[in-house]
Image (tube, helix red, strand yellow):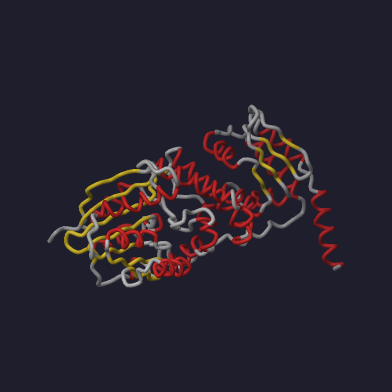
Amino acid sequence: MAATESATAFGQARHLLASPAPFRRALARALPDRPFSVAFWDGSVLPATAPDGAPQFVVRTPEAIARVLAAPGQLGLGRAYVAGDLEVSDLDGALRVVGTWSPPAIAASDRARLLVAAALATGPRLPPPAPATEVRLTGERHSLRRDVAAVRHHYDVSNAFFALFLDDSMTYSCAIFSRGAATLEEAQDAKRELVCQKLGLQARERLLDVGCGWGSLAIHAAQNHGVHVVGVTLSPEQAELARQRVADAGLTGQVEIRIADYREILGEQYDAVASVGMVEHVGEERIDEYAQRLAALLKPGGRLLNHGIARLRHDDAPPGPFSERYVFPDGDPLPVSRVIAALERAGLEPHHVEGFRDDYAETLRHWARRLDERLDEAVAIAGEERVRTWRLYLRAARNGFETGFTSIFQVRASAPTR
């Protein structure tokens, strides 16, 4: 007990000795016009120069600055936020600042002052360890082994966690409100039915559901269109609940859920293939192979519906290090033109392309609100770090759709009849 009390007292004393004053003054000099305020652990505040309503960044501990010094930019800020060393009064407002504010060029002398002041503010300390929820994947990018690790990092948080903010069907992809739906449940049902209609499903046909999640599309297609479905996911937690939901619906003989990758489905033939919310995980390295594999699974004249997020600007960089380490490791939405090119190279004929950018923004708005309404439960299930990550991720993703950084497209294509 004495050792613990001494360590706590030492930490508190070190925080008191680490004064943010030099850093606050250097920051004010470097950024004379600021659409945000910054509060520090000693109670001092660098006020915003913008009108009222500007978001406030709260530097709760010197470790926040130490993290940014160790990894300048997005990764250091992300680590500080996930660890709780950095708070934000208004996440939506902060994302607006990030998306619209153009900071001035900082003179070399001011940059030097900032670095020295930041070092003084942190005091004599080593960089804190990365938060426990940070992941660093190893091995060949988009190899089967690495893809398994990437998918499970995102999806094997807890079924109960996702149930806090998804609709009752546990559909974790863009809902469609633009067809007249008033609720998230109605919008997800409209999306599932639209996928089935675009595929022209007929009774007793075979449907492959790639990236089946918790089985919502597979169950819908079997119940409403009489098809036999094989759904595949890399997440054991998803598969376990999907199988239970299939059994509860009385569809065990009609719907099969496998833990498998699309590259592991060999020698089978299907009338239709649906890939919903999965192509974002494929990457430039595998997109042509992905299209070829799915094309090979289609019977002559078979239909494909590919539904996925896409970058709208070809010269934009892939997702940054925060998403890579905390949200979607190896996730890389490609331009829809690149996806279509891969389908054509695989011998498929595209027939229809439809975008749902506004629909996904609205979907994410619902998810973020639902999660915020159940934060205590979310923390109890997944822990503070995961919940902070998801609150930021849902809003950042929505912001991407609202500003035109990303969109989402359904591409319908078919295999040759001979």
> Looking at this rendering, what residue extends furthest in the right direction?
2
Residue 136 in sight from this viewpoint: no
Residue 138 shown left or right of residue 253 in the figure: right
Say which residue appears at 59% left-offset and 55% top-offset.
387
Q: Is residue 22 above or below residue 133?
A: above
Quadrant the N terminus occupies = bottom right
Query: Where residue 70 appears, x then y in whole percent?
Result: 64, 53
Q: In front: 21, or 391?
A: 391
Say which residue appears at 31% left-offset and 50% top-offset.
194
Query: Where residue 187 appears, x then y in whole percent?
Result: 40, 47
> Looking at this rendering, what residue extends furthest in the top direction?
51
Quadrant the C terminus occupies = bottom left
> Looking at this rendering, what residue extends furthest in the left direction?
418
Residue 47 shown left or right of residue 389 in the figure: right
Query: Where residue 123 appears, x then y in whole percent?
Result: 77, 51
Residue 287 in sight from this viewpoint: yes
Q: In front: 178, or 5?
A: 178
Quadrant position of residue 200: bottom left
Residue 308 shown left or right of residue 415 in the figure: right
Query: Where residue 397 appears, x then y in whole percent?
Result: 48, 46
Q: In front: 270, or 22?
A: 270
Count of numbered circles on the image: 0
